[in-house]
Amino acid sequence: MAAPPVNRWAQLAFGVVCMMMIANLQYSWTLFVQPMNKAHGWAIADIQLAFSIFIALETWFTPAAGWIADHLGARHGPTVVVFAGGLLVAIGWVVNAYADQLWLLYLGAVLSGIGGGSIYATCVGNAVKWWRNRRGLAIGITAAGFGAGSALTIIPVEMTIDTHGYGAAFFWFGIAQGVIVCLLAFLLRAPLPGEVPTAAPLRLPQATRSMTPGEVVASPIFWLLYVMFVAVSASGLMATAQIALIAKSYGIANTPLVFGGTTLTVALVVDNVMNGMARPAFGYVSDRIGREVTMAVAFSLGAVAYWLLGSLGSSPWVFVICAGLIFFTWGEIFSLFPSTCTDTFGPRYATVNTSLLYTAKGTSAFLVPFANIIQSSTGSWHAVFVAAAAMNVVVVLLALFVLRPMRRTQHAAAEAGTLSAK
């Protein structure tokens, strides 16, 4: 029986909304840390371990989720995986709401991490499959839902915490987000053979055949991308997890700034918007000027942003602007790396292959606590920002002088093989 026609713009929209529903799992976390510390007396480092567990599982589980989605097929795979993810996200946040011991908080992180990763992997996999000729833009729009989604709920979450406690915020937002994802799961579908438009010209070199996950993990290009991803992701996650603590250390967290909003509240909203905007913006640019050149531009700006925040961030408005620039030059990794991966290794196993690369984010999460160690040993955040800037500069050099030649060589070899086969 033939599948009914599907509008790929609608599929893109469904994926974006699903991503928006799981954005709070990461980007609102910083709002819960101090209330949990105050309520239970848990050490900040112990609470932040839950964040690391969430990030690790939200990324490391994605290859399994991607394999299941691909294995179940275009019609059923996305629905099954995203529905299960929505259930786990809701249950995980409800567990957080009632957690009165650290092991329960960690259990909530495990459940929400697996659920969030299942949703993320499937939505990104759908984007790279439906949009062959605009892959960077499509992934960027999808990832923007995750990067900017919590901008709409930062203030409501903060108000709920202040008025009813952090447990109520975990409970009600967890239930609402999970229900919406579960409903949208029934509308998601991957493209069937011949369903993706192929008339539009390809601006960038793309793989002539799809490589299996086994072939991908045996490729030096994959591991180079992995190392680059870890380096940039670690610096961005440090800012995500610690932004409230950084603002507090500067003495400006509660400084009124605009419309009654404090420096921290305004910064969180701006950060999430900029994080979301970066993904389609740099994805669109990379579709035209190339992945590696776009990486070089973005990560160079990121290095400057970290240096400025470390040097001038004690002023409220400068803090907001510099933090926003950091998120703008970090969020694009979630469009640039998946599109580069699929361009290099092909679309057939894209959900699994991009998920394998996405596990780099989980690896980078365990570098986040080193920011606290450096800050404690030096007495300031300046050395942390210098280290983050340096990592971005290294990735710029790798993108231009190592990754770019390697990908060109692989593409030339594939083209020569194709021509000789003919």
Image (cartoon, rainbow, N blue to C red):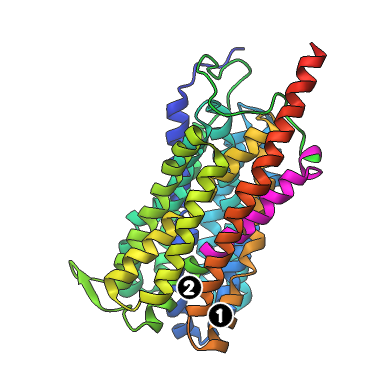
Q: Quadrant of residue 343?
A: top right
Magenta span includes 216: yes
Identify the disc placed on residue 242: 2
Q: Are marks 1 and 2 in contact (CB under 8 Å)?
A: yes
Whether residue 64 is situated above or below residue 70 in the rendered picture: below
Please indicate whether residue 339 sits to the left or right of residue 265 in the image.
right
Residue at (22%, 71%) from the top-left corner?
257
Magenta span includes 7: no
Please indicate whether residue 367 sits to the left or right of residue 327 in the image.
right
Q: Amino acid at mark 1?
A: Asn
Judged by its main secondary structure, the magenta piece is: helix
How far, Cα to Cα, is label 1 from label 2? 9 Å
Find residue 68 and report its horizontal and vertical position in percent: 70, 39
Precedes in sequence: disc 1 or disc 2: 2
Find residue 308 and report its horizontal and vertical position in percent: 40, 69
How busy is the neighbourhood of tag 1: few (under 14 within 10 Å), some, or many (20 plus)? Answer: many
Which SS class for mark 2?
A: helix
Magenta span: 215-237
Q: Quadrant of residue 76?
A: top right
Q: Which residue is mark 1?
A: 372
Find residue 41 and report its horizontal and vertical position in percent: 51, 87
